[in-house]
Image (cartoon, grey):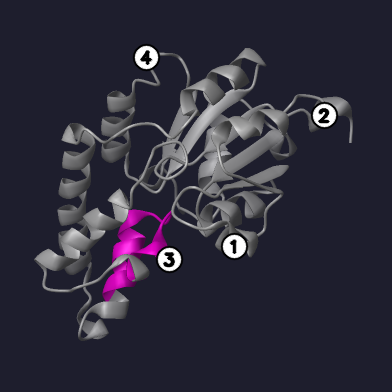
Amino acid sequence: MSEAAMTICLVVFDMAGTTVKDNDDVSKALIAAFAQVGIPIGLTETNPVMGYPKPVAVHQLLQDHWPDATQVTPELVDKVHSLYLQAMIRFYQTDPDVQEATGAAETFAALKQQGIRVALDTGFDRATADVLLQRLGWLEQGLVDASVTSDEVANGRPHPDMIFEAMRRTGVDQVSQVAKVGDTPSDLQQGSRAGCRYVIGVTRGSHSAEALAKEPHTHLIEYLPQLLAILTPGD
């Protein structure tokens, strides 16, 4: 492979838990939605579906915990998902604890100074992602080149569709020039399925280093600025 082909041109970052601090906030919104329909679940139940498109996560949790799985209808999934969306959007609009992960903006800026494009992909829908992006101000600061949400592609994580769409939106043709960064097993599975050159797990999000180490990856890091030593063009 030529040096040009090996240069990283695009980094695709997950949002909640990776570039956005997440004190189990996404899980708490799911837990609250399920409580409203009379189903008690906790972090043990929600953690395995982190990173998935939220309708898929809701459907899986209902299949596992509704008293009669045969009664899990599209209408029920939509109801619980709507309750979750209301809680999540309200949190991102108003909660004072909403903030970027340590070093996120700094890392985006450093990558862009090296000519590397920055994209976000997420299990959120577009409405939720836009509320969060507006709150953090990354677009206004010119730190993010593109974002892709799970409702904008045919298949969310762990499928690679969002990575390929991020490549299309940023004009990157070679997946060997792409790095994927995320904090969930589905992020690492997604990057591996896409064929990204680097698949990097962040261990200060929803999953431990031990859990992420079991998934396909090239690196595990604690903090986003540690990427800069890995993603040097032409390394």
**Residue span colored magenta:** 45-62
**Disc 1, SS:** helix
Are discs 4 and 3 less than 8 Å apart at CB?
A: no
- Residue 158 visible to the viewer: no
4 vs 2, front mark: 2
Q: Amino acid at mark 1?
A: Glu
| Disc 2 residue crowd, few under 14, some 14–19, many 20+, Cα 10 Å | few
Residue drawn at (67%, 58%), measured in percent from left and top?
216
Looking at this view, is 43 or 137 the one in front?
43
- Residue 104 visible to the viewer: yes
Name the spot of residue 201 as percent of width and height, x first.
59, 48
Q: Amino acid at mark 3?
A: Pro
Q: Amino acid at mark 4?
A: Glu
**Badge 4 is on which residue?**
140
| Disc nearer the start of the sequence (4/3) | 3
**Badge 1 is on which residue?**
210
Q: Is residue 35 left or right of residue 4?
A: left
**Badge 3 is on which residue?**
48
Q: Is residue 124 magenta?
A: no
Residue drawn at (59%, 53%), measured in percent from left and top?
188
Relative to residue 157, is residue 34 depicted above or below?
A: below
| Disc 3 residue crowd, few under 14, some 14–19, many 20+, Cα 10 Å | some
Q: Residue furthest right?
A: 2
Name the spot of residue 171 as percent of width and height, x first.
61, 25
Name the spot of residue 94 as percent of width and height, x first.
16, 33
Q: From mark 4 to mark 2, how far is it between C-alphas?
A: 31 Å
| Disc nearer the start of the sequence (2/1) | 1
**Badge 2 is on which residue?**
235
